[in-house]
Amino acid sequence: MIETQLQPKHWIMLGILLIAIVIASIHPLEYVPYLLHQIGTLLMLGLLFLCFYKIGLSFASFALYIGFLLIHIVGAHYLYSYVPYSDWTQALFGFNLDQTMGWSRNMYDRLVHFAYGLFLYPLFLRLFQVWLPSLKPLTLYVLVIQFVMATSLFYEWIEWLIAIGLSPEEAENYNGQQGDIWDAHKDMLLATLGTIITGTICLCKTAKPKA
């Protein structure tokens, strides 16, 4: 169901987001990169409200969008490259995730890019449904995938332009490349794969005959 007015459930999600921002703002690893990332959070939050009031969103779309921002906020606090998820898995489940998977770098930034496609597909689909209402579901599916690919590329350009204006240390902290020359390519691929997964699920639901 498409909604255009905030309900208690929406305010609960926004309250959780606000609490996360406050907690993440307490002693982040580096303030300059953290603030740069949180500017992105505020811009994305503004986009969410604009879409919600202008075209309406389902609660699932709204909640998934907030979920993506929560993942991003955690990454911003730890500069993405230093999120101690392996320490968390060790404490909670008794194994080190990096060692178990054979990873030599911190993979949290990969999760965020994957979540971008996985969680934001419903909102992007809604945008195209409003802009191009006559298109068939399969065409919309392809357009959203292309949109995520294009915006992922644009984000990498913006990240690069910001990084070249910082000191080498600040640029590395902000960029989170961790010495991987193919970092941007892998990030864009994961965002695309996330979109394909959610998009395929949504497309299959659309194709089901109504009882």
Image: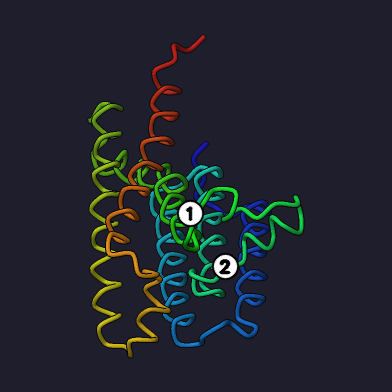
Residue holding disc 1 = 111
Along the line of sight, which residue is nearer the eye, 157 or 140? 157
Q: Position of residue 106 (x, y in %)?
A: 50, 63
Q: At label 2, which amino acid type do we have?
A: Val
Q: Secondary structure at mark 2?
A: loop
117 vs 83: above or below = above
169 vs 96: above or below = below
Q: At label 1, which amino acid type do we have?
A: Leu
Q: Position of residue 182 (x, y in %)?
A: 28, 59
Determine the residue positioned at 50% across, 50% down.
4
51 vs 137: above or below = below
Determine the residue positioned at 37% across, 42% down.
126
Q: Secondary structure at mark 1?
A: helix
Determine the residue positioned at 54% across, 52% down.
5
Along the line of sight, which residue is nearer the eye, 101 or 189? 101
- For the residues labelled 2 and 1, say whether their Cβ atoms are less than 8 Å apart: no
Cα separation, mark 2 vs mark 1, equals 11 Å
Q: Residue furthest top?
A: 211
Q: Which numbered marker is on residue 191?
A: none
Residue holding disc 2 = 83
100 vs 199: above or below = below
